[in-house]
Amino acid sequence: MSHAFSVQNLSYRYPKAKRDTLREITFSVEEGEIFGFLGPSGVGKSTTQKVLIKLLEGYSGEIRYFGRNLQSMGKSYYEEVGVGFEMPIHFSRMTALENLKYFSGFYKNRINFQELMERVGLWEHKDVQVGNYSKGMKARLNFVRAMLNNPRVLFLDEPTAGIDPRNARTLKDIISEYRAQGGTVFLTTHLMSDVDELCDRVVFVVDGNLTDISTPRDLRIAYGKREVKVEYREDDALASAVFPLAGIGDNEEFHTLLRSKDIETIHSGETSMEDIFIKVTGAQLP
């Protein structure tokens, strides 16, 4: 498996800023993975994304895109990447269909977007001016636009924010299918349920630095407790007991409880991605 992106010692400082927003960060994004780039607002997530999609230049360090120096790549780069910004950008006085026809005209390689619009529930609204769309409809149209050129790499910023659970499920299914077909996703989001469900690996950005590059599963184990909590009914009241996970197969008290009580729930001690986010970054989720 090759690196979609290999980033070495990336630093960036905005003009007139007194300190770097990014401070010699190093990471790689593998081809065919969904890579979560996580952290609280204002720590450099959007800056990193803008550097990777060549909206910001003047950085130090080295970025390679499938082995090629990113700085040396011209407009052909945009034929290979799709971008879904957090705030959808459309022409509000044009219909959804007019918007997509206009933007697809920028690319040599284009998808038949009718099928994708049908799947996200927008085709029946294709002739409605986008200014009359709801927030969720604009977000779904934004996703379709990011896929117009059948990109090799997809940048998504809060792709399911403001979208109802049914349509969010559809988008996540499409993202997973895209990955299964070899696509690479660079994902930024504050929705940790999306991270848990979609991401192969994640990294946290803390004050311009990176920490804890790992899989969501390994993070839950590392930050959780190796224990099992059993909730059961006793004398019409809810009771609970906690057992160490080590040696649980030989723990006679645990097995006796399972055999003799009316068990309601059994939970392992692994923590949630929300709790990990707070522990690692020191910040609350929005």
Image (cartoon, grey):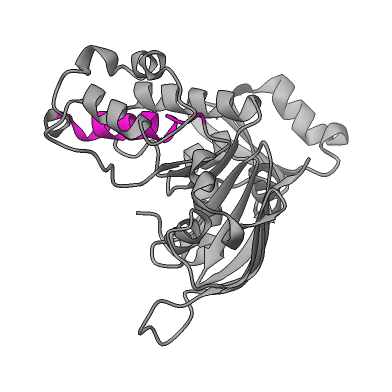
Q: Quadrant of residue 130?
A: top left
Q: Label the magenta part by its dominant secondary structure.
A: helix
Out of 169 and 75, give the one closest to the viewer: 75
Q: Magenta stretch containing residue 198, yes or no?
A: no
Q: Locate the N terminus and report the quarter of the image it occupies.
A: top right
Kindly indicate the quadrant of the structure image that contains residue 50. Answer: bottom left
**Residue 133, percent from left and from top:** 17, 29
Q: Is residue 145 magenta?
A: yes
Q: Position of residue 95 (x, y in %)?
A: 17, 26
Q: Residue at x 49, y 38 (%)?
A: 194
Residue in the image at 77% along x and 27% along y: 256
Can residue 163 be seen from the camera position used here? no
* Towards the viewer: 117 or 227: 117
Q: Residue at x 50, y 39 (%)?
A: 79
Classify residue 212 by image quadrant: bottom right
Q: Is residue 238 left or right of residue 167?
A: right
- Position above or below: 17 against 119: below
Residue at 70 percent across and 53 percent down: it is: 222
Q: Position of residue 207 (x, y in %)?
A: 50, 73
x and y percentages locating residue 77 in the rendered image: 54, 47
Number of dots carrying numbers: 0
Q: Which residues are magenta?
A: 133-150
